[in-house]
Amino acid sequence: LAVLQDCRPRLLLALASFEGRDYGGELREMLGATDFVERRILFGEGWQGGSGSLAAFCREGETLGEERFRTALDAVRPDDPLAVVYSSGTTAEPKGILHTCATRVAQSRGLAGLGFDEAAVTLISTPLYTNLSIPALLATLWSGGLSLIMGRFDEQEFLDLAERRRATHFFLVPIQVQRLLDAPGFSRCDLKASRLVYVAGSMFHTALKRRLREAWPGTLVEVYGMTEGAPA
């Protein structure tokens, strides 16, 4: 609730439920005392007494038309806000960090040198609101490649998808690296198409880093940086 009160979104998109937890009900109760959310869209189902489903929301976008879309696109300026990304809150309350369109364009251009092109296939298994997933998604779109977005992380599903779709780029946190390397199916997985393994988010121990370099093809890039930097 503190994050919502800080950024005061007009549109809220959320999961209706996950593993038996009723997020819709919790959000309805949480937002009862707020007046800034004008519309709520739930993944998976409609909101009783509120807004419709994600599918219906997406269909609305299809009716905008090319002219209206181009007009909106032409109005965008480099310093316009693109996203507010919240820090992890490990040392204090999470704080909102504003990233502009120019920031993300610079980031996407910078990542292009890491083998992103029209043949790139990026496998994203971390939440899209994080500062690990956003660069992966935008850099792939910038290059004209393909992004594969997992609904949730599962080691064997990840490996099966990576092999079947010939994934080239992977963005992971260290605990995911460990779980993948320890997975029974890892040694049988064909990762020859891999170009880049990009690791960030927490401490990446030397022993685990060595295991990854020995077992996973492609270039390993380990990143440290502040959310404020995007990284730029």
Image (cartoon, grey):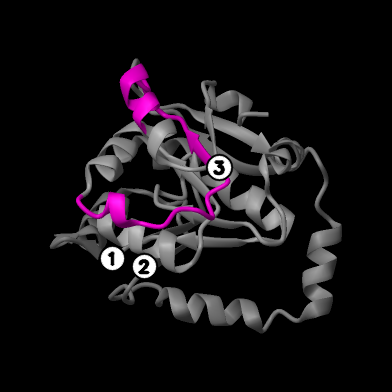
> Quick one: 36 or 3, which is closer to the camera?
3
Q: Give percent across and percent down for residue 18.
A: 22, 60
The residue drawn where x is 51% and y is 62% is: 166
Residue type at numbered disc 2: Leu
- State if disc 2 and disc 1 touch (CB < 8 Å): yes
Q: Regarding mark 1 in the picture, which secondary structure is present there?
A: loop
Instruction: Write down the residue under mark 1.
Output: 16
Between disc 2 and disc 3, whose residue precedes? 2
Q: Is residue 180 magenta?
A: no
Q: Which label belongs to residue 196? A: 3
Q: Which label belongs to residue 144? A: none
The residue drawn where x is 51% and y is 58% is: 167
What span is in magenta?
Answer: 184-211
Q: Give percent across and percent down for residue 170.
A: 49, 47
Instruction: Write down the residue under mark 2.
Output: 42
Q: Give percent across and percent down for residue 87.
A: 44, 28
Q: Regarding mark 2 in the picture, which secondary structure is present there?
A: strand
